[in-house]
Image (spheres, grey):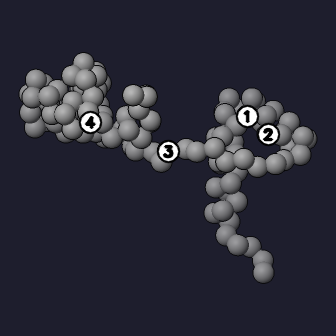
């Protein structure tokens, strides 16, 4: 079985946090392992992490690849901006698209 996605990890941590509040650690390990089809050892790790949470972990939408064609100069500018701000290319493009979409339809 592959690694859990960030969304799956957040869901499991939030559930582990809830189980810890309702049950003791041994019962929470068994329930978490059974509900998510993971090993008791992995369930215990989620529960250990959940013990330190002060609030639920936000569940973010999974990301998928989206291919677009851009000019070489645009790609170069985006890479330079990402490097200068310490951001990933995905973060830069996502922020730019969100800013554009928030502006609305514009004219016409």
Helix, strand or loop under label 1? helix
Which residue has dot 4 on it?
36
Say whether residue 101 is left or right of residue 77: left
First along the sequence among labels 3 and 2: 3
What numbered label is drawn on residue 62? 3
Q: CA distance from mark 3 to mark 2?
A: 23 Å
In percent of width and height, residue 86 lies at 68, 29
Quarter residue 54 falls in: top left
Q: CA distance from mark 2 to mark 4?
A: 40 Å
Q: Residue placed at 41% from the left, 32% from the top?
A: 4
In percent of width and height, residue 17 lies at 23, 35
Q: CA distance from mark 1 to mark 3?
A: 21 Å
Quarter residue 50 falls in: top left
Tag 2 near tag 1, CB within 8 Å: yes
The 10 Å Cα crowd at callout 1, few under 14, some 14 to 19, many 20 or more, is: some
Single out the mark in the foreground, 2 or 4: 4
Q: Residue placed at 91% from the left, 41% from the top?
A: 73
Q: Nearer the viewer, residue 1 or 4?
A: 1
Q: CA distance from mark 3 to mark 4?
A: 18 Å
């Amino acid at each position: 079985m592959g690694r859990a996605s960030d969304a799956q990890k957040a869901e499991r941590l939030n559930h582990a946090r809830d189980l810890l509040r309702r049950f003791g650690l041994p019962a929470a390990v068994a329930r978490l392992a059974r509900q998510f089809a993971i090993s008791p050892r992995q369930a215990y790790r989620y529960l250990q992490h959940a013990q330190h949470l002060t609030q639920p972990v936000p569940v973010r939408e999974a990301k998928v690849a989206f291919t677009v064609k851009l000019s070489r100069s645009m790609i170069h500018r985006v890479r330079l901006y990402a490097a200068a701000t310490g951001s990933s290319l995905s973060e830069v493009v996502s922020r730019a698209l969100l800013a554009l979409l928030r502006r609305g339809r514009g004219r016409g």
